[in-house]
Amino acid sequence: MFDFNVRIGGYKRSFGCRVTENGCIVLDESLDVAGYPKIKVKKKTIRLNRYVYEGAYGQIFKNMVVRHICDNPSCINPAHLLMGTIADNVADRVEGERSAVGENNGRAKLKEQNVRFIKKNNTLTVTQLAKMFSVSRKNVRLIKDGKIWRKIGTSKARDKAATGAASQIHEKVGL
Ligand SMILES: [Zn+2]
């Protein structure tokens, strides 16, 4: 168990989480009927993963949902969250059921998105990051020091990628 910090409305809140072997950061409490961790903010009940997503990557566009690449609704690992349409989300679920027994299931691999998260994150320790992505602490240090995955995470490249992704999403939902 460790405390995972999430910024909500300008305040930092801590949630007691555990890390699974897939690198999922899961909450075992306050789950809604669908298995998503929920919190109350100003009398409204909201899924925690939306705050985590926005804290890590920025605003969620209108009509978009936060998807889990790990198929684990109780997971709030930012590296496992992805913005998508409701249709994408349904497709994820079908795909997930199909591959649940296949070799795709489990084993976290480091993706660009993960590396970017490691570089950007200042609140989690090296040990926590290593646990989160199922990699060694040495690996996390090398990433942070820019010794490996060098090309990822220069701010210009990131901005460009983010802008590209945003315009694609805008096209998709017709904004
Ligand atoms: Zn996960």
Image (cartoon, grey):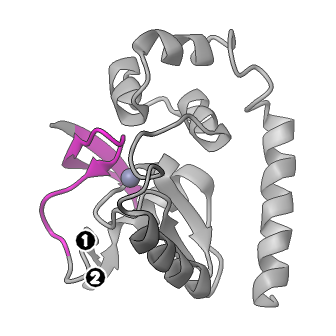
Q: According to the image, label 2 marks what residue?
A: 45
Closer-to-camera residue (6/160): 160
- Place of residue 63 in the rendered image (x, y in percent of width and height, measured from the top left): 61, 87
Q: Is residue 103 magenta?
A: no
Give the residues in magenta: 3-31
Q: Is residue 10 magenta?
A: yes
Question: Could you tell me residue 59's position as x and y percent?
Answer: 62, 67
Occupied quadrant, residue 88: bottom right
Q: Percent x, y for residue 58?
A: 62, 59
Quarter of the rendering containing residue 33:
bottom left
Please name the residue shown 56% across and 86% down the image. 86
Q: In the image shown, does 71 or 76 lie closer to the viewer?
A: 71
Question: Badge 2: few (under 14), some or many (20 or more) residues near its Cα, within 10 Å?
Answer: few
Q: Which residue is mark 1?
A: 39
Is any atom of residue 53 visible in this view?
yes
Residue 126's tag is none
Q: Is residue 9 visible?
A: no
Nearest the viewer among 68 and 125 is 68
CA–CA distance between discs 2 and 1?
6 Å
N-terminal-most mark, 2 or 1: 1
Amino acid at the residue labelled 1: Ile
As drawn, the residue found furthest toward the front would be: 102
Instruction: Give the amino acid at mark 2.
Output: Thr
Question: Secondary structure under badge 1?
Answer: strand
For label 2, being within 8 Å of ligand 1 is answered no
